Image: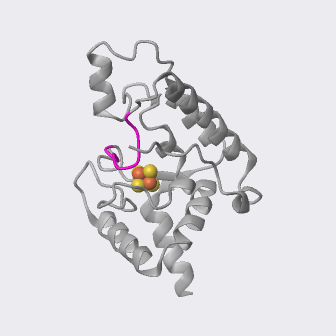
Amino acid sequence: MKPFPQDDVPPRMRDATPAPLLRLHADIDTRVATIREAHPDWQCARGCATCCRQLADIPRLTAAEWALLKEGLAALPPQRLEEIRGKVARLAAAQSRPIVCPMLDEMEGACPVYAQRPVACRTYGFYVQRELGLYCGDIEARVGGGELADVVWGNHDAVDHALGTLGEARPLTEWFADDIKLQAE
Ligand code: SF4
């Protein structure tokens, strides 16, 4: 399978993205690249999307992450965007967990807003969070089987701390609802 590209924010959007968020992206990219270089067969790749299909809850984003994500959403074909809006609306009313990310292209197993995805998505499978683990059962199974002992995992609690400096994080469903309200005004 083709690995995810080591992309960052598309150049056109870099100027509008706050420096602390870009720094966080760069730090995560470095950690991810280091792990991938030592393990060229790393299983996170286009077509997997296991983590996107099993989110513990509705993703929470800071305003800066939402602004970036909106750029990616705005570039999607209108019909695709409407589908996503419909899924988000249904998700807002749903109680069951875990959830499938409403943005995931389930046929392709790919993220349609990959370059603009939230910070948490960048860390899945490479960062560990206290009491929440690695966010990937498949990788955790490898660790449990004694593999990957050499990996220096990223610290997700530190990422959350850095995100906290960017302001309040709100559920994706609320960002979408506000956006629809704004468009109606
Ligand atoms: S935004 Fe993209 S990478 Fe993140 S959970 Fe959704 S589909 Fe997966």
The location of residue 154, given as percent across then percent down, is 52, 26
The location of residue 170, given as percent across then percent down, is 50, 55
- In the picture, the quarter occupied by the C terminus is bottom right
Main SS type for the magenta part?
loop
Q: Which residue extends farthest front? A: 1
* Residue nearest the viewer, comparing 93 with 53: 53
The location of residue 30, given as percent across then percent down, is 62, 31
For the rendered model, the colour scheme is: one colour
The location of residue 37, given as percent across then percent down, is 53, 26
Q: Is residue 59 visible?
A: no
Whether 134 is drawn above or below 168: the answer is: above
| Residue 33 colored in magenta in the image | no
- In the picture, the quarter occupied by the N terminus is top left
Whether 39 is drawn above or below 21: the answer is: above
Whether residue 52 sits left or right of residue 116 in the image: it is left
Q: Is residue 152 visible?
A: yes
Q: Which residue extends farthest left? A: 96
Question: Which residues fall within the magenta stretch?
Answer: 43-50
* Residue nearest the viewer, comparing 184 with 73: 73
| Residue 45 colored in magenta in the image | yes
Count of numbered circles on the image: 0
* Residue in view at x 29 percent, y 69 percent: 90
* Residue in view at x 43 percent, y 38 percent: 124
* Residue nearest the viewer, comparing 37 with 153: 37
* Residue nearest the viewer, comparing 22 with 49: 49
* Residue in view at x 69 percent, y 45 percent: 22
Q: Which residue extends farthest bottom? A: 185
